[in-house]
Image: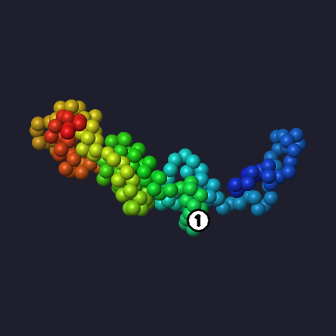
Amino acid sequence: MRRWPKSSKSVSSTVDVRWEESFGDEPELSSEQVSDEPNAHDMALRLLTRREHGAGELARKLQQRGVSREQAQGAIAELAEQGWQSDARFAEQFARDHAARGDGPMKIRAAMQSRGVQDAAITAAMRELDVDWLACAREARRKRFGVDIPTDAAGQARQQRFLMTRGFPASDARMALRSNESNQD
């Protein structure tokens, strides 16, 4: 089975073949172009073209695909130097997307930490959000349970637990159950 090169060079630059002569045939590749080792740089770039990734998450995905730890770190460092990978950019986008989904600040922070994002990038991204977490908690409660606030302790506890599992602090969860108003001034 013939394999295409896994380098950034195009086949047309490595093989001198005219179109008419090669129609239907694959060009012969030299032994240096065919390699059993995965190309970490190309794999990482392919992953980054789909969506932003943090360095830790990207390294884990590359290692799952058979890339050694050293190759993965080298490829990620090179891509970060070229501007393709940025933990700060990933953290900002991740925080913005998850806040828009209705997740609370604690859940967003924990999810970024589990993806290997550094604490400094997480803190900066959370500071940049400029979100009223109490209003988000009220909206999440309203979407899940409707406008009526339960009067019994069991119903209130259930709704408070729901908000806390969504990542809202207990104080915001309690406040969200105190009034039906979505924007309280």
In this rendered view, identify the residue nearer to me: 19 or 171. Answer: 171
Q: Residue at x 21, y 47 (%)?
A: 172
In this rendered view, identify the residue nearer to me: 104 or 83. Answer: 83
Q: Residue at x 30, y 53 (%)?
A: 106
Q: Can residue 114 be spotted in the picture?
A: no
**How is the rendered protein coloured?**
rainbow
Q: Can residue 16 be spotted in the picture?
A: yes
Q: Is residue 77 above or below residue 153?
A: below
Q: What residue sits right under mark 1 in the picture?
A: 74
Number of marks in the rendered image: 1
Going by the picture, which residue comes out furthest to the right? 21
In this rendered view, identify the residue nearer to me: 37 or 121. Answer: 121
In this rendered view, identify the residue nearer to me: 154 or 89. Answer: 89
Percent across and percent down for residue 16 are 86, 51
Q: Residue at x 39, y 49 (%)?
A: 95
Question: From the viewer's perspective, is 14 left or right of 185?
Answer: right
